[in-house]
Amino acid sequence: DLASTPLGDFLTARARMTIPNPSELVVKVVSDKDVYKQLPEPLSKVNARSYSWCSYRCKSILAFRKFPNGSEVVFFGMYVHEYGRACPPSNA
């Protein structure tokens, strides 16, 4: 079993409003981490300012459907990259 998160619970509740058998559906955030990347030299110069790094949050969200025989199947997956204000221009 994957742990529950506030975002996963919210997405599960919203998704269950749209299907006929809501108890069969669950949405889980399976990964949520901060990533720091070193930028290659050609990409590190943006708007006449030099940036050597870029940080963002990476999330992996999966939707599961439970079947009467007990099996669970992933029917939707989404990877999200969230760029914050600390990121260089064009990403923030």
Image (cartoon, helix red, strand yellow):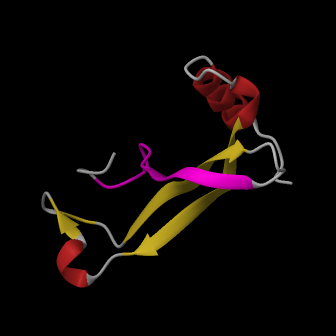
Residue shown at 61% from the left, 50% from the top: 62
Please tell me which residue lies in front, 54 or 6: 6
Q: Which residues are magenta?
A: 72-88
Which residue is most to the left? 48
Residue 71, x across and y down, in percent: 78, 55
Q: Main secondary structure of the magenta part?
A: strand
Foreground of the two, 34 or 2: 2
Of 17 and 24, nearer the camera is 24
Q: Residue furthest front?
A: 69
Residue at 44%, 45% (x, y): give it.
84
Is residue 68 depicted above or below 6 in this figure?
below
Can you name the residue that lies furthest to the top here? 17
Residue at horizontal 64 percent and vertical 23 percent from the top: 16
On the rendered image, what quadrant is the N terminus found in? bottom right
Quarter assignment of residue 74: bottom right
Query: Is 75 contained in the magenta span?
Result: yes
**Percent x, y for residue 48?**
13, 62
Q: Which image quadrant is residue 45 in? A: bottom left
Q: Relative to 3, is 36 on the left or the right?
A: left
- Tell me, yes or no, whether the highlighted magenta stretch contains residue 63: no
Q: Quadrant of the C terminus?
A: top left
